[in-house]
Image (tube, grey):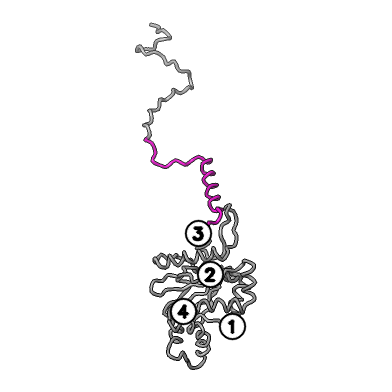
Amino acid sequence: MRCSPSVRPGGARPSRSRPGRRRRRVRPARPRRLPSRRRRRPPRRRVRRRRMRERRGKRRPARRDDCVAAGPRLQARPNGGGRCRMDGKQVWAEMREGNRRFVRGERRAYDFAARRAELLAGQKCRVTLLTCSDSRVVPEFIFDVNLGDLFDVETAGNVVDEVGLGTIEYGVEHLGTPLLLILGHTRCGAVTACCGEDGRAHGHLGSVMDRLTPAVERAGRDVDRAILENLRQTKREILEQSEVVRRRVAEGRLEVVTALYRLETGEVEPVE
């Protein structure tokens, strides 16, 4: 019996695939992935904007607080751009604010290492300060200032002679400080000794007593009054004997201030 060409023996139909063609395999469906916990990267545009803001923040104009903490005689301009030099009244206001921090025990933390490196190029003083050589009077602590902010002239009883005047003129003229501060203090040992019975002293200490005696006599040998009178006398002597100081005061480039430091409280008070 002859079989039909479309039917194979046993009833199986022939394959419809062409010779040499592979059958397509059906791959199983992949399991659905859970959302990744990895933080997505922000778009490049947002990254560029953020970097531009950071760069602009680094170039912000200096503020007044930055100038005071840094120490140099600079301040921010009213329009916020650049820097300019402070005058004597502004420096005195900053000094008094620093004294208030000292009284409250809130002194600033300065980077002395960076300041030392900065001062290698030269002095950057804001104040020429004449004060007593008493060890209890430390102007940098009393006014909470940085290294190199004060050009100190220290003598017993804060009196002035030719050497002292020359040193003051160096700070005022050569360093260009806008403020000359004459600082006395309570319980001054030199004034107290001069207010004694005879006011005499041996050796070179006698020259100090000779300069204190006029103020002590005008105060009636009262120690507290003599300290204040000595401050006024020292200011008069500087203005009378120093042509450099007088000229800079007349030009408006120098402010001369007298003040009293109270050992009992740590406060500094102006003296008229």
Dot 2 or dot 1, earlier in sequence: 2
What element does badge 1 sit on?
helix
Label 2: how many residues lie within 10 Å, few (<14), some (14-19) or many (20+)?
many
Q: Earlier in the sequence, mark 4 or mark 3?
A: 3
Q: Earlier in the sequence, mark 1 or mark 3?
A: 3
Closest to the camera, between mark 4 and mark 3, is 4
The residue singled out by tag 3 in the image is: 65
Crowding around mark 3 (Cα neighbors within 10 Å: few <14, some 14 to 19, many 20+) is few
Residue 163 disc label: 1
Residue at the spot 37% in from the left edge and 32% down from the top edge: 32
Q: How far apart are the two marked residues, 2 and 3, measured between alpha carbons?
A: 15 Å
Q: Helix, strand or loop at disc 2? A: loop
| Disc 4: which residue | 227
- Amino acid at dot 3: Asp
CB contact under 8 Å: marks 2 and 3: no
Asked which secondary structure carries label 3, the reply is helix
Q: Which residues are magenta?
A: 34-63
- Furthest residue in direction bottom, as rendered: 202
Mark 4 burial class by Cα count in 10 Å: few <14, some 14-19, many 20+: many
Locate residue 87, reporting x and y percent: 58, 64
User: At 48% across and 93% down in the image, what residue appears?
Assistant: 202
Q: CA distance from mark 4 to mark 2?
A: 26 Å
**Residue at the limit of the structure toward the left, as seen here:** 10
The vertical placement of 24 against 85, above or below, is: above
Residue 83 lies, in percent from the top left, at 59, 58
Say which residue label 2 marks. Answer: 149
Q: Secondary structure at mark 4?
A: helix
